Amino acid sequence: MNLTIRAATSADVPLVLEFIRALAEYEKLAAEVTADEAGLAATLFPAAGRPAAECRLAFVDGVAAGFAIYFTNYSTFLAKPGLHLEDLFVKPEFRGRGVGKALLLGLARLANERGYGRMEWTVLDWNKPAIAFYESLGANRLLDWQICRLTGESLARYA
């Protein structure tokens, strides 16, 4: 097996959207995806300014196998930036072959290279295979923290 991982380019936007939709389907959240190619291109590869996030793509023998989207966050307690992994997805036919591990550990290396203080992500509580995978790599689940979110109409109310 020949596994390669590279940074996504603007030409990869359709593939990134395909992965996002596949992840949403897996997570039973397909109806929540409103992203489109134009929106991804504008936020991942803006004409000016910093991108909102970065993306890595994994290929097995030249076939697209998985992706990871991440962005920089900040820890006031550490006074350091961190890496937030927003999405990690490997196509079912490539699971169990080290693709997800290579993507995740590649981002951990990147966080170290950039001098970040931590790397974090969320996982759905029902996704037992992902939880077991993350814990096998040494990740700690922060069970006492809850995510709070304003989105859609709730966010727009404060415009």
Image (cartoon, rainbow, N blue to C red):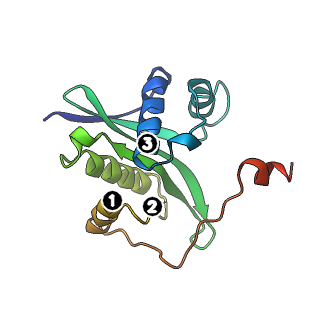
Nearer to the camera, 117 or 56:
56
Q: Which residue is mark 2?
A: 124
For discs 3 and 2, the disc positioned in front in the rendered view:
3
C-alpha gap between disc 1 and disc 3: 16 Å
Q: Which residue is mark 1?
A: 130
Amino acid type of the residue that numbered disc 1 sits on in the rendered structure: Ala
Pointer 1 and pointer 2: residues touching (CB < 8 Å)? yes
Amino acid type of the residue that numbered disc 3 sits on in the rendered structure: Glu
How busy is the neighbourhood of tag 1: few (under 14 within 10 Å), some, or many (20 plus)?
some
How busy is the neighbourhood of tag 2: few (under 14 within 10 Å), some, or many (20 plus)?
few
C-alpha gap between disc 1 and disc 2: 9 Å
Q: Earlier in the sequence, mark 1 or mark 3?
A: 3
Q: Earlier in the sequence, mark 3 or mark 2?
A: 3
Nearer to the camera, 50 or 27:
27
Q: Residue at x 77, y 54 (%)?
A: 154
In the picture shown, does residue 149 fall above or below 21? Answer: below
Q: Which mark is residue 118?
A: none
Q: Which mark is residue 25?
A: 3
Q: Position of residue 150 (x, y in %)?
A: 71, 57
